[in-house]
Image (cartoon, coloured by chain):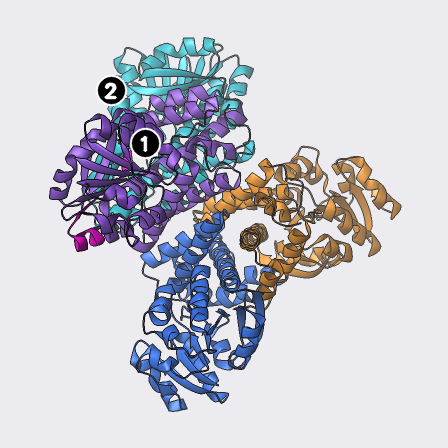
Chain colours: A orange, B blue, C cyan, D purple
């Protein structure tokens, strides 16, 4: 497929590289042009604007930071949607709001193009190895058409339902992660204050019914003081804000989500916005390495 | 070993049965005598008082509802500790407070007896099959002496540290469970309000880095409306209260724990105290089966 | 002044009546036309559309339910702003977002008109008696020009700062009210559960340094089971949502606001959205009359 | 009256001085003896132990830091209660738990003495001027007997109900104060982040129905960076902990109280335990003077 790929952050750059390696013809664009060099070296074309990346593409993939970036890139006059050929695909790999996904679908439909929302879960490593998990929202036909693109970056593709539903599930999942992390940090802080070896806590957890690879992944990072960014505090805060707006609009009380968003807000206020979400632990002085 | 076993609730009755089946000589006691019949049928002796169950025993195991029950049974004048033979073992399988564990250790030491705290994690099924996980707090020597008893009920025994530390880890673990459950309930309520199939949420979760058997275990129970009690709302509330007191004494801010304890309090206020913790979902009208 | 008045809810209808009684020439509009009858009887003209109410007016006042209503009325093509004469005033008495206030200011400026944000505090009775308090955001000149209108409805006019600042202060004030109400409800529920006479609590409070007429106003309403709507749960929820969005954008951690918004969300989920905010007490079964 | 007065902290020293000035014969005791010097200079006798202060007294007043201090002083063998003459009065001016108040009442009754719980509200200035407010729990007869003592320190005496009820009301009142303070801090932090003059917020608040002298008292202290201790973060944290335990035992969901206790915990963790509760504002970097 001829693919335009927009957004070369932590995840996007790795996904674009995989598309290229799997034999697609890829044109990349990024807001700051420096990030395109590595992709150009792999054989990608580099576009000077979103529209240029979209022109003549069979599919355009977006992997951008937040809803305003998606709006500016895709929905602005003369932007991606205005440039899509009839029948072309727009695949949004970013995590936005259900409302934005529905607006993108409508804009594509008005143009005779097709839209698939497809937020991503997985690590940098998963992005590198093409083993991400994709949650897809859209029609079965659109999903089928997008498969060559999706299968180049993901080892698992889950059709959640119509457009909007995949974003909802993604935001819920990130809320679950955030609450696990809050629980973990409170637990590690309690261990430390009580003089209990935190490795014993992780050992007990992993022998229990609520075991999860995530406890060790983040627990070990915190104990090692390793806050290299896989998923930043700022991005999590953005997702929790979107999740809270969604719950609010639906009338669903969400005291856990509301509480934990303020914890991430506090982490940002203390200067950890760019660090990995594991840096939530910094709210408890002295916890971790 | 000659073992006195006190407390024949959901977990205790199954553990006592396993001790008996593994060849120990077991004398049981329970506050309400009806529960002793099934154990008597397996060949256990039935004691009329805690002291009678403790007299002459190599080890006494407690599996009681809460700290006041442990105090009344073990520490009251003429109770278990007053009856222990020199060198005998007291093993507390209940979940109490670190402070109570230290008092039990001191009382045993004053008597020339030995104390091991050993809270339990695992399900009714694990109790039945003898595959529980035990967190042990006490000296290595006491743990070694208690192994024949412990191995009859558990498939994994983790030595956390000195007396008090195992209870701390148990309370932290239950806080982690409670926050996972809150996250799950908020997520399922959001799915329902948005018309998203909740099974898709569970599918996505289990394909992700934060996967855990617990999401499916409780998620499926909620969706099926199956609130058969494995671990009751009342007991979880008791443990969260103990955890919050512990965090408070240690000076550890715990906004997640504080929030979720009130959620369980609200579930109790709405009449779900005796139901399984999955009934937390009842706080969101119409969620689940 | 010739004044167009849009929005005849609980507060708006009373304010419009006062404008009329003070000698202004008032043209009213309301989404549902039935509410205009009482004003017509006082001598107001009734407009068939927002634009008709705005045409030829010296000032247009908005008193609408929420930001989408303000947008639809004022900013839609052919709406109020498009109809304002050069030099005319737009006064927004609604509680919206700071961002919306800035957009209204810009739209008015583009038209050669002037904008004042002027959210209101006070009761129905204050609206009736013209003794409301207004928080004004805008230039000193615009405020001076609007005074004849403002003084017909308010006994106190506070110039907070530029456009946007008055809305911020209004949203903060409503958050303070919401947290007072949460504290009051928790206190009354504790009194009831403990068998303490709630009137004694109010007596102590009013003899203390944190006394406030609000404790008695809402405390007595709750104890009497009087939930006649002065300020509805739905409107408070809307304002808390706006306040939370504002805090989020500013990077201010607000765990109290976040918590209490979910309490109002829970009250809505239990069917109390249209009742007075005192109905928050309904979250505690059996509290109040 | 011959009065033994135990506990010469911020409030106690001023109350003891007033008792002396009003003509009572006062014997004081304090854990650290230095604090007794100023009272000795006023003519008080100084006792070497709690029992010595209680011996032969008509009434003994306690003004101690927390329940363990009250227990150690009053209930220990050979302590105050063991020394009370038949018919003598024990008046607890400290803020403890309802349970402790009931235990003190029972211990006094066993001795033929009488007990009145009488927690205090008011400032250092009120303590100095004898214009405190007392919440009293006990029988009408005991309250009548204690009046000469109470009227020397307070300008308002409210009979809440039987022993236990006054402590409950005191703890609820402090929860109300804590939530007001949280609301105020979040509001001031929002003003600062948005560039709104905080004095305008206070002006609006004091013109509104939720006005309270407390907003200005603490708001001005925060803006001035004046954290001189009237009521310390540590003491408030202690009271919120007692309030949360009380709510928990009564089965009352209290999400506001639970949230704000953790905020005070966080303030302690950041080193503000000894400062005035206004130092809660320090959780928002840069707020206040």
Magenta stretch in the rendered image: D106-122
Residue C216 figure quarter: top left
The numbered disc on residue C83 is none
Q: Is residue D191 magenta?
A: no
Residue A16 vs residue A105, the one in the foreground: A16
Query: Residue beneath label 1, please?
Result: D13
Are discs 1 and 2 less than 8 Å apart at CB? no
Q: Chain of mark 1?
A: D
Q: From the viewer's perspective, tell me whether residue C213 is left or right of residue C158.
A: left
Q: Chain of mark 2?
A: C
Q: From the viewer's perspective, tell me whether residue C22 is left or right of residue B15.
A: left
List x then y, in percent, for residue C78: 49, 23
Residue D247 vs residue D192, the one in the foreground: D247
Query: Residue beneath label 2, please?
Result: C129
Residue B76 figure quarter: bottom left
List x then y, in percent, for residue A40: 86, 44
On screen, B39 above or below A223?
A: below
Secondary structure beneath disc 2?
Answer: helix
């Amino acid at each position: 497929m001829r693919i335009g790929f927009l957004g070369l952050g932590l995840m996007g750059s790795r996904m674009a590289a995989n598309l290229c390696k799997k034999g697609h013809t890829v044109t990349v664009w990024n807001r700051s042009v420096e990030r395109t060099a590595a992709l150009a070296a792999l054989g990608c074309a580099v576009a000077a604007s979103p529209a240029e990346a979209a022109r003549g593409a069979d599919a355009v993939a977006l992997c951008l930071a937040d809803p305003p970036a998606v709006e500016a890139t895709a929905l602005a006059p003369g932007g991606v949607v205005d440039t899509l050929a009839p029948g072309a695909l727009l695949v949004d790999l970013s995590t936005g709001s259900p409302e934005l996904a529905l607006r993108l679908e409508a804009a594509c439909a008005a143009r005779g193009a097709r839209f698939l929302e497809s937020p991503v879960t997985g690590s940098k490593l998963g992005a590198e190895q093409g083993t991400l998990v994709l949650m897809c929202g859209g029609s079965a036909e659109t999903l089928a058409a997008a498969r060559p693109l999706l299968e180049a970056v993901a080892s698992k593709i889950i059709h959640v339902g119509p457009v909007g539903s995949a974003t909802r599930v993604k935001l819920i999942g990130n809320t679950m992660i955030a609450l696990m992390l809050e629980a973990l940090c409170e637990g590690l802080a309690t261990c430390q204050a009580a003089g209990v070896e935190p490795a014993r806590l992780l050992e007990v957890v992993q022998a229990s019914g609520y075991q999860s690879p995530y406890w060790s992944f983040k627990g070990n990072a915190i104990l090692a003081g390793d806050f290299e960014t896989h998923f930043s505090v700022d991005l999590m805060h953005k997702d929790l804000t979107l999740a809270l707006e969604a719950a609010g609009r639906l009338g669903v009380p969400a005291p856990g989500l509301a509480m934990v968003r303020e914890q991430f807000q506090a982490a940002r206020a203390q200067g950890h916005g760019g660090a990995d979400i594991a840096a939530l632990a910094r709210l408890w002085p002295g916890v971790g390495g």
